[in-house]
């Protein structure tokens, strides 16, 4: 399997701290390198990782509050400065097109890189990628906000002992996977005879939101869920008022949605001790729990094993 | 004397490095706290200094290339987030007003802070401050660019032994300084009899430019000159082509202009060893020479002593 991992650039919410840069996340997923919500300073944070601006294939912005997109101008200008030769797709809420235009041409620069600007026009919009489907779902926040979900199609895990039993090897394996069957000496071998289902991986990225249907649609059976938990339960009323989640809420959503690996981030500077987010979430979620720190890398967990039928 | 010092936020040019953030400089000068050329990440760099966004009284932008102003949106939004109660003046080349408008309202935010937008309309424009005069001079760069110079008026240094000889003390000293003379028992004592001239301090901020008259006008007799030296002499032809200075050029300007303390900055990432800037400049400048690093503070040198006449 190709490398699939999340590189965390920043984990602060509205105000950065000495330890936490503004938001920013890179998802490496096969031939896609997707930058989510580049906050101010993302360009420089990249220098402390193995990702370069040249690697980026796609940028996804959840909404146009500054902490989620003020790194866009620097990133976009950097694509041209580095003479990135491939087009880079950009997704953002269509209602924020004017903000995007300002950020794209925020200052004078010599534009060479090609952006493919593809705003999200509607809840549930899907974008077909070679490695799966990127889906946007509307979230609950004071301005138009979308979360994103990347879903790999379910596939097949070939069973070597079965293939060997039929004498299938080499290019014939690829043909069997692609076509679904293979005719050998007048006998048809179907894919199902020599494989078991291989569930596709699912990644979800949920930023600023109160509890809502879109949040659950994004999180459903995610192998890796990155989710804001700006607040703790002690500020639950404030969180609801301003359209944010608490660590407990994020953890309960993860449990109810069958999430496997949970990454909490986008922390308010009012809580200096990140262990409080861990402790509060742990009480509501039994899976793998990560309280994100800047410049850490989180692997996608191995694909689920198909349940016996 | 009140505190007068330069706080360096970042020292990179077009591309930041692991060691160097994009540009950004704060000048503390009596009741003024002036942010010059806030590049991306300036808001967070401030957290590593003793300056807060709340302290800022004024922002000066030399030009609208990204490395000199992509920190503006974050800084402006931070003024509102922190509920800064005093107005903050903003100066920038008037020809870049459209860029300023985009940066000011780059994303959705709740605006509470008051900006006093005062673009630089002409070469030599002067802005009267309570602590002196801020002057803008046109520089030589592919887009409209102004350097800034802050000049304290010349004053008087009272001589305690002379004051004592005349029996002048307490509030009378203030009156003498203000009015210029004092009548004591029918005898007039002029200020000049009990003082020597006190030259005002001069600070100059020179960013992206080739050699030009404006550069010399800014640097003239500066006590502290902050100046770009993007390149070394080995790239002098390239520097001239793109409107930049070499370390040797910056040092020669400083010498020819009678600069006392010289701060070189805005270094191209192509030179990993900053000692090369020092060595090259040292050959052309005998005064105090500082190759700027991020998050260092440079004091204004004590005022010059007036030459005997």
Image: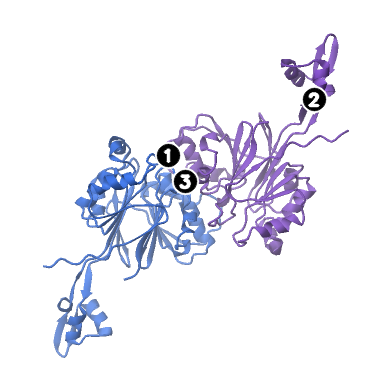
Chain colours: A blue, B purple
Quadrant assignment for the C terminus of chain A = bottom left
Badge number at residue B159: 2
Q: CA distance from mark 2 to mark 1?
A: 54 Å
Task: Please report whichever mark, 2 or 1, sits nearer to the chain's N-terminal start.
Answer: 1
| Residue at 61%, 62% in the rendered image | B270
Q: Position of residue A120 (x, y in %)?
A: 34, 53
Residue at numbered disc 3: A18
Question: Is residue B191 at all visible to an observer of this figure?
Answer: no
Q: Name the outermost residue toward the right.
A: B309
Could you tell whether B307 is left or right of B133 in the image?
A: right
Task: Write down the chain letter for disc 2.
Answer: B
Residue at numbered disc 1: B109
- Which quadrant of the structure image shows residue B230? bottom right
Q: Nearer the viewer, residue B39 or B158?
A: B158
Q: Do tags 2 and 1 sit on the same chain?
A: yes
| Residue at 28%, 35% in the rendered image | A237
Between circles 2 and 3, the one closer to the viewer is 2
Q: CA distance from mark 3 to mark 1?
A: 23 Å
Quadrant assignment for the N terminus of chain A = bottom left
- Which quadrant of the structure image shows residue B166? top right
Could you tell whether B239 is left or right of A260 in the image?
A: right
């Amino acid at each position: 399997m190709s490398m699939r991992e999340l590189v965390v650039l920043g984990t602060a919410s509205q105000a950065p701290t000495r330890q936490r840069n503004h938001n920013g996340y890179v998802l490496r997923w096969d031939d896609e390198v997707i930058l989510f919500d580049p906050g101010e300073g993302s360009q420089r944070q990249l220098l402390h990782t193995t990702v370069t601006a040249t690697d980026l294939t796609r940028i996804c912005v959840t909404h146009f509050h500054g902490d989620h997109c003020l790194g866009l101008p620097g990133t976009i200008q950097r694509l041209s400065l580095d003479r990135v030769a491939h087009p880079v797709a950009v997704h953002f809420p269509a209602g924020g097109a004017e903000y995007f235009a300002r950020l794209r041409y925020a200052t004078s620069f010599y534009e060479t890189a090609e952006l493919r600007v593809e705003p999200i026009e509607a809840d549930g919009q899907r974008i077909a990628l070679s490695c799966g489907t990127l889906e946007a779902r509307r979230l609950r926040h004071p301005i138009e906000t979308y979360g994103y979900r990347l879903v790999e199609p379910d596939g097949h895990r070939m069973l070597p002992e079965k293939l060997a039993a039929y004498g299938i090897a080499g290019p014939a394996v690829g043909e069997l996977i692609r076509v679904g069957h293979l005719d050998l000496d007048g006998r048809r071998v179907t894919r199902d005879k020599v494989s078991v289902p291989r569930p596709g991986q699912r990644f979800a990225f949920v930023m600023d939101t109160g509890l809502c249907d879109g949040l659950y649609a994004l999180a459903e059976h995610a192998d890796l869920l990155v989710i804001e938990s700006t607040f703790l339960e002690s500020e639950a009323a404030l969180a609801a008022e301003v359209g944010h989640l608490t660590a407990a809420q994020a953890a309960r959503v993860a449990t109810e949605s069958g999430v496997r690996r949970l990454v909490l981030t986008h922390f308010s500077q009012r809580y200096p001790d990140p262990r409080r987010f861990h402790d509060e979430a742990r009480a509501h979620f039994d899976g793998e729990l990560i309280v994100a720190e800047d410049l850490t890398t989180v692997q996608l967990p191995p694909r689920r094993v198909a349940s016996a039928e």
